[in-house]
Amino acid sequence: MEYMYSALLLHSAGKKIDEEGVGKVLKAAGVKADEAKIKAIVSSLEGVNIDEIISKPVAPVAQAAPEKPAEEKKEEKKKKEEEKVSEEEAAEGLGALFG
C-alpha cells in the first residue's frame, strides 16, 4: 500500500512518477523499498490518468454483519428451543379442547 501512496504523493506534488521518485519517498518514510514492487507500481501507472480515477465516485462497499459472540448464539438457540416447546405445549392443549 505504501508504494501506491508514494506514487499518489508524487502525483499530488506534480512530480513525475518514476522508480527513483517512488524509491526516494519510501526511503524518506523509513520503508525498506523492494525494487521489484517499485518497478511494478511505476509500470502499472504508466498511461493512467490519476486525476480522472480520483474524481470518479466510488460506490460504497456492503459490509458484512459483525459476528455475534458465542454467548449470543447460544441464547438465540435456547430461545428457539423454548419457542418450539411452547408450540408443542399449545398443540397439546388444543387437543384437550376437542377431545
Image (tube, helix red, strand yellow):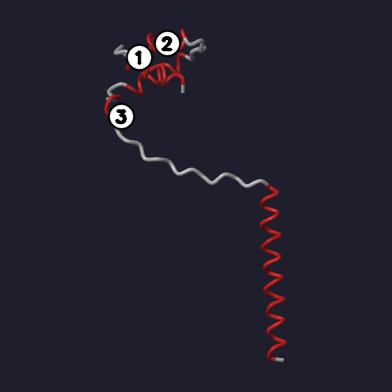
In the image, residue 91 above or below residue 41: below
Label 3, label 2: how far apart the Cα atoms are = 22 Å
Mark 2 and mark 1 in contact (Cβ < 8 Å)? yes
Which residue is labeled 2 in the image?
Answer: 25
Which residue is labeled 1 in the image?
Answer: 10
> Total marks drawn?
3
Residue placed furthest toward the bottom: 99
Image quarter of residue 3 = top left
Three-letter code, disc 2: Val
Is residue 20 shown left or right of residue 83? left
Label 3, label 1: how far apart the Cα atoms are = 16 Å
Task: Classify mark 3: residues with Cα within 10 Å, few (<14), some (14-19) or many (20+).
Answer: few
Which residue is labeled 3 in the image?
Answer: 53
In the image, residue 71 above or below residue 60: below
Q: Earlier in the sequence, mark 3 or mark 1?
A: 1
Residue positioned 37% across, 16% down in the render:
9
What secondary structure is marked by label 2?
helix
Three-letter code, disc 1: Leu
Task: Classify mark 1: residues with Cα within 10 Å, few (<14), some (14-19) or many (20+).
Answer: some
Three-letter code, disc 3: Ile
Between 36 and 47, the residue placed more toward the observer is 47
What secondary structure is marked by label 3?
helix
